[in-house]
Amino acid sequence: MTKHADTLAPPPPDPNLAFRRVVVKLSGEALCGERGGFGIKPETLHELAAELASVHRMGVELAVVVGGGNIFRGLKGASAGMDRSQSDYMGMLATVINSLALQDALERAGCPTRVMTAIEIRQLAEPYIRRRAMRHLEKGYVVIFAAGTGNPFFSTDTAAALRAMEIQAQALFKATKVEGIYDRDPMRHEDAQMVSHMSYDRFLSDRIGVMDQTAVALCRENKLPIRVFKLTEGNIRKVCLGDAIGTVVEDR
């Protein structure tokens, strides 16, 4: 049973940690296990929760932002003729569903968790308050940020960047289906090479599609490093320990 919030003791930090407080951005597809898939696959959800719980036990102050594309994607609804704002609000609610599912899986893995949402749904989750979120992290909770920024026209990538800045995270991790960022489209060019480092300016000028441009511009303005890597077993843990996995986006 989880201890009361006032007495919860955070795990002691691993002395080898390269990062003590991070935001992990996951796509909704991470919960269904396949690109373009729909719904939540329990086995995939539990594997992901086990990975995040292992990172938390290392003493990392861990926050998570999960997309909602496995349930509803706002841009897709808008392209089909829906009002863009209405469509985006539906997408935000999809992220709440995913966040609650991830919370349940994390707590089953023995990891105390709080969901904080930018849209008030008090029966299900706490409203997002920056100082309360930071206090939860200090106490040893994993914090899941749901409902994006609470505003239409902004992606969950941008929400992850914003929350990372607000809680003073050391890095933003973008866990994806690819190994990192390539110098050209690997699906079209067999000789494409993954780059280990990329500047914010190059990411924006080359219009790299792995992350929303607004999110990267926000990180550039606040000098928050971004790590893009493949979501496979053990990779989040390895990155927290400083392993050179994926691509780092930052100003050298």
Image (cartoon, rainbow, N blue to C red):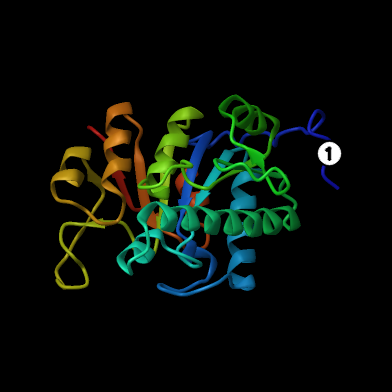
The crowd level at tag 1 (other Cα within 10 Å; few <14, some 14-19, many 20+) is: few
Relative to the observer, which residue lies in front, 102 or 97?
97
Q: Which residue occupies the extreme right position in the image?
A: 1
Q: Could you say which is closer to the camera, residue 103 or residue 50?
A: 103
- Across and down, in percent, residue 90 comes to 49, 58
Residue 243 shows up from this direction: no
Closest to the observer: 32 or 48?
32
Three-letter amino acid code of the residue under disc 1: Lys
Name the spot of residue 11 as percent of width and height, x first.
70, 37
Q: Residue at x 37, y 46 (%)?
A: 154
Q: Is residue 212 left or right of residue 170?
A: left
For numbered disc 1, what is the local secondary structure? loop
Left or right of 105 on screen, residue 252 = left
Which residue appears at 57% of the width and 33% of the height? 15
Above-or-below relation of 74 to 217: below
Per the image, the residue denoted by label 1 is 3
What residue lies at 55% left-to-right and 55% top-to-bottom?
Answer: 93
Using the rendered view, name the quadrant where residue 77 is placed: bottom left
In this rendering, the answer to whether 19 lies above or below 178 is above
Q: Position of residue 68 (x, y in %)?
A: 49, 60
Asked whether residue 9 is in view, the answer is yes
Determine which quarter of the picture holds residue 101.
Answer: bottom right
The C terminus lies in quadrant = top left
Label tally:
1
Q: Seen from this angle, which residue lies furthest top?
A: 131
Q: Residue at x 68, y 59 (%)?
A: 105
Q: Nearer the viewer, residue 87 or 100?
A: 87
Q: Position of residue 128 (x, y in %)?
A: 59, 35
Quadrant hosting residue 61: top right
